[in-house]
Amino acid sequence: MVSAIGESSELSEAILKEILDLYKDIRKLSDEEILSSSSDESKKLFLKLDALITQDLDSCVVSILLNKQELEPIFIHLNRFRNLYTVKLETGYAKEVLASQSPWDVLEEFPFYKNYLKLVRTEYEGFGLKAGDKIFFLGSGPLPLTLIVFFKYHGVKGTGIEQNSERAKLSTEVLDKLGLSKEITIVNGTHYSMNPIDFLGLDTGIKALVIAAQAEPKKEILDYLLTVMPPGCRISYRIYEKGLMKLLNRDFLLDLPEGYREYKRIRPEPPAYNTVIFLEKKSNYSGIPEY
């Protein structure tokens, strides 16, 4: 036992050195450099970070690192970089789709396309959806792959909500290029863009709402949704809770707001990284204001 603890401590120190070395390089980059630079530096750093956080490590090693409170600002910075580079990657592929004569072929070359196939199937089955149903997706980004996969493979229509106006416009153009603009729409807004009327008639309207892993802050979003959703409405949100992935995004520590019950939690199977948590608004919750 003592030997195992010693080995975990030694490995955690080695991992810590990798984290700090990455941080030293990443912190030099501004948001604009990450999003717009034509240099390969951001790509190299992203690949290094991705390789680091997807390692299959013993839980003891992860716990040692999680308990180092002084590392919290570093993890936040690394998560910011990863989110921004993901936007850059999606934006690049969105533009390639628009420029291509074979847009679907380009789309399916997206590095994490297979991840989305697995993730969306998990949500489709977890919600108990069927073809013709409709969903909301909060945080749809410049390349709305979640909504595209939901419709292409499962026949589920959707509305994406994206707070950045340029990304919302780009994703709308991508959907038009793919011939999906009748089945999938994009709204430029935030969770505050949703109103009680959007959820009226769950038999014909929105069946469920998916919250992207990058959509933040989760607590604020979930609190607000309690005020606009009817009892029984279902939500899924994506978190990282496997290995070092949880170091970059602490949503796995989220205290669930009163008014929800968690009815299912599905942990990732390769190639997906996200655990999907399924919630339902309690039928007896009375904290919602009158409309």
Image: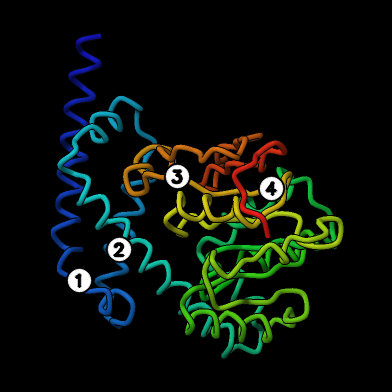
Question: What residue is shown with label 3?
Answer: 240
Looking at the image, tell me whether mark 1 or mark 4 is earlier in sequence order: 1
Q: Residue at x 67, y 70 (%)?
A: 159
Q: How many angstroms separate mark 2 from mark 3 (CA)?
A: 16 Å
Type of amino acid under label 4 = Arg
Please give the residue where the numbered disc 4 appears in the rendered image. 234
Q: Secondary structure at mark 3?
A: loop
In-image side of 30 versus 161 (left or right): left
Q: Are marks 1 and 2 in contact (CB under 8 Å)?
A: yes
Q: CA distance from mark 2 to mark 4?
A: 31 Å
Question: How packed is label 2: few (under 14 Cα within 10 Å), some, or many (20 or more)?
Answer: many
Q: Is residue 283 above or below residue 20?
A: above
Q: Please name the amino acid that badge 1 sits on.
A: Leu
Q: Is residue 8 left or right of residue 85?
A: left
Q: Are marks 1 and 4 in contact (CB under 8 Å)?
A: no
Residue lying at 80% horizontally and 62% vertically, measured from the top left = 205
Relative to 132, residue 56 above or below = above
Task: Find residue 187 and name its label.
Answer: none
Q: Residue furthest top?
A: 1
